[in-house]
Image (cartoon, grey):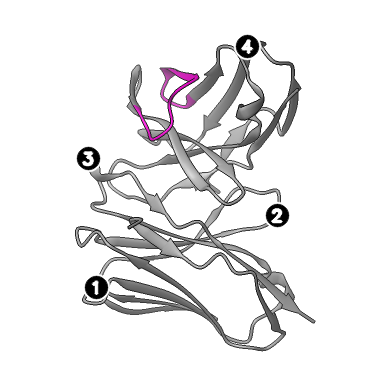
Amino acid sequence: QKEVEQDPGPLSVPEGAIVSLNCTYSNSAFQYFMWYRQYSRKGPELLMYTYSSGNKEDGRFTAQVDKSSKYISLFIRDSQPSDSATYLCAMSVGSGGSNYKLTFGKGTLLTVNP
Amino acid sequence: DVKVTQSSRYLVKRTGEKVFLECVQDMDHENMFWYRQDPGLGLRLIYFSYDVKMKEKGDIPEGYSVSREKKERFSLILESASTNQTSMYLCASSHVNTGELFFGEGSRLTVL
């Protein structure tokens, strides 16, 4: 079983739709969870960073972590064509020292159609 | 604004050539990383460095070496490029106390 599983998509939605992106993981030691957005031919950029179980909201984006189910989600409300990108989940055991290595999902390609 | 700069966006090299990929960060980060990204395989860690002159192998170090002589600069070296090293190479850095990676724009290498 891979440490982090993420559906690669592609996912195509109409503008204004609510998008749900998900990752599951097997390592219960993961404590820090991130979502990165990667536009075509660019490097990934950090979108959301969470530590505890529960929800974290930032504008149209909500990150959700359920440690008991080993499941994380990213919700995008009122999706826009500019949200079209690959979304990568990432997680780590700790935030410092030797635990700084991130384990990434393979990414989900999202297209928001005008 | 935080910045990770990769010197070359696009490179074309021939099999057997030595290739240098340079990365500079201006955030005074302790940690620096080299990844490669391939369709269907995602991001894979090649090498990372947690201090000047310190390095550790990642998941796929074979065929690569690295150099970190200054805190802000981390170089990836392909001693003898091969066609299976055609890929997008991404450099990243992070502060020692956080796991947040900041990535460069990537260097797309084609080996003919």
3 and 1 marks in contact (CB < 8 Å): no
Front position among marks 2 and 4: 4
Distance of mark 3 from mark 4, alpha carbons?
33 Å
* Percent of width and height locating residue B110: 72, 29
Find out whether residue B1 is within the magenta segment. Answer: no
Q: Residue at x 75, y 22 (%)?
A: B112
Three-letter amino acid code at the position of disc 3: Gly
Q: Which residue is mark 1?
A: A67
Q: Which residues are magenta?
A: B57-73
Identify the subunit bearing mark 2: A
Above or below: residue A60 compared with residue B94: below
Label 4, secondary structure: give it. loop
Label located before the other in sequence (3 or 2)? 2
Out of A83 and A111, give the one closest to the viewer: A111
- Who comes first in sequence, dot 3 or dot 1? 1
SS at mark 2? loop
* Residue A68 to residue B107: above or below: below
Q: On the same chain: label 1 and label 2? A: yes
